[in-house]
Amino acid sequence: MTKMAPELPIEVDSETGVWTTDALPMLYVPRHFFINNHTAVADALGVDKYAEILYHAGYKSAWHWCEKEAECHGLEGVDVFEHYMQRLSQRGWGKFVTEAIDLDAGTARVRLEHSAFVYQLGKTGHKEEYMFTGWFAGAMDQILAARGSALRTVAEQTQSGAEPGCEVGIFEVKPLAGDAR
């Protein structure tokens, strides 16, 4: 393993201690702290309810992030999505690889390698990265809206590295039912 310094710009306000990357405030917490809190909430609410809540919150957050990053860096279209995958990868969630993306069709396929959830929880036999699904649809929909498209999408995790026989996670983005073009 080769170690390197973070590839994303991090600034820390000396007065407030607030971390920022590309002018967006950030939090820096240990992986176990985050995942322990995540699993405690899932246990309390039930995975299905928690996944639904996270989907909508993640969707909204991804839309906002992509909108701000596109503006900050002068990006558009697929470049916004790729920048998002790069930044997610640089933040320790795992390595996100866009295997396919078609903005006209409103589809994408993302592979997740080195999942922080799988590293922390191991082979649980379940899809552990459900937190990410809303992120991909939110990113796609912001990009589509910026292009003037009314097409909207939904994302789903189809496999997880935490499941038997799987080494990576796979996420599919597709148009909402009845919105295929």
Image (spheres, grey):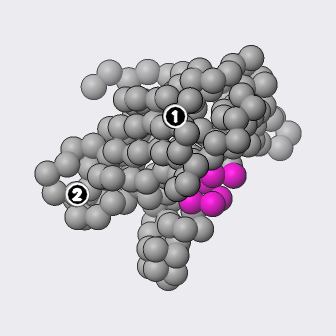
Q: Which residue is mark 2?
A: 163
Q: Which residue is mark 1?
A: 105
Helix, strand or loop status at disc 2? loop
Left or right placement of residue 87 versus residue 36 in this view = right
Left or right placement of residue 175 versus residue 168 in this view = right
- Which of the two discs, 1 and 2, sits closer to the camera? 1
Left or right placement of residue 15 versus residue 33 in this view = right
Q: Residues within 10 Å of mark 2 (few under 14, many from 20)?
A: some
Q: Position of residue 70 (x, y in %)?
A: 72, 26
- Residue farthest to the top, as pictured: 74
Q: Amino acid at mark 1?
A: Ala
The front one of 31 and 76 is: 76
Identify which residue is drawn at 49% across, 29% down.
102
Magenta region includes residue 57: yes
Q: Is residue 71 above or below residue 138?
A: above
- Residue farthest to the left, as pictured: 165
Q: Which residues are magenta?
A: 55-60
Identify which residue is drawn at 16% across, 57% down.
164
